[in-house]
Image: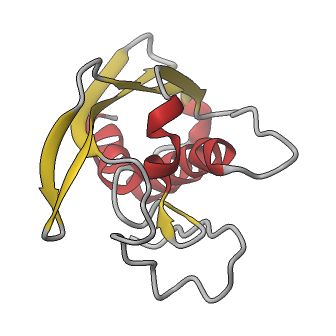
Amino acid sequence: MRGVLNNFLSTYMSRYSTFDGYWVFGFIVNHLDKLEIDILSPSIPEKQDARGTAKLLAATKFMEQIRKSGLGSSCVISASVVLSKSSVMRSCIVEDSDRTGFDVTFEACAYIDLGKRYDRSDTVFVAPHDPTLERRSARCSNRSTSQDSEN
C-alpha cells in the first residue's frame, strides 16, 4: 500500500492531471484552503468544473494504482487525499516565468482490511492558472474538460 500511495501522489500531482488542457490545480489554488476527497467514492458536482475534475481524477488515479499493484480494491476500507495550501504566497520560476503562488500539500491516507493505516504526503508549488504564460496540453483537442489518465 505504501507503493500505491506513492505512485498515486506522483501521478495525481503530475502535469497529466488536467482541466481543459491545463494543470487542474492552477484553477483551484486561489479558492483552496483545504479540500478533502474520499478517493473511493468522491462526491462530484453535476456540472464538471475544475474542483470536480480534481476529485474525479483523484479517484481514477488511485484505482489505477490499486489495479497496477495487484491488490484487490476490496482490501481498501477507506482512502482519502487532502489538499491544503500554505498561508503565505511566494515566488517561483515556472517554465522560465517568475510566478507567484502557494505551496500545496497533498496528504494521502488509506486503511486496509488488516487494520493498518498508510500515509504519504508531498508538497508542490502551484501558481494560479494563467493561459498567457502556460502551455495547453497538445492532447486536449477541444475546449471541453479533459480528464487525462495517461502516465
Asked if residue 77 can be seen in this view, the reply is no
Q: Nearer the viewer, residue 3 or 98?
A: 98
Residue 123 is situated, as x and y percent measured from the top left of the image, at 22, 35
Q: Position of residue 147 (x, y in %)?
A: 61, 65
Residue 137 lies, with reference to residue 145, above or below; the image says below
Q: How is the image coloured?
A: secondary structure
The image shows residue 82 at horizontal and vertical percentages of: 45, 24
Direction from residue 24 to residue 8 in the image, left or right: left
Residue shown at 26% from the left, 29% from the top: 121
Total numbered badges shown on the rendered structure:
0
Q: Residue at x 42, y 67 (%)?
A: 16
State whether residue 135 is above or below residue 33: below
Residue at image point 36% right, 64% down: 15
Foreground: 10 or 137? 137
- Above or below, comparing residue 12 to residue 120 in the picture: below
Confirm whether residue 102 shows in the render. yes
Q: Residue furthest right?
A: 46
Q: Quadrant of the C terminus?
A: bottom left
The residue at the point 15 percent across, 43 percent down is 91
Residue 5, by quadrant, is: top left
Quarter holding residue 108: top left
Task: Report whether 44 appears left or right of 93.
Answer: right
Q: Position of residue 101 (x, y in %)?
A: 28, 40
- The quadrant of the picture occupied by the N terminus is top left
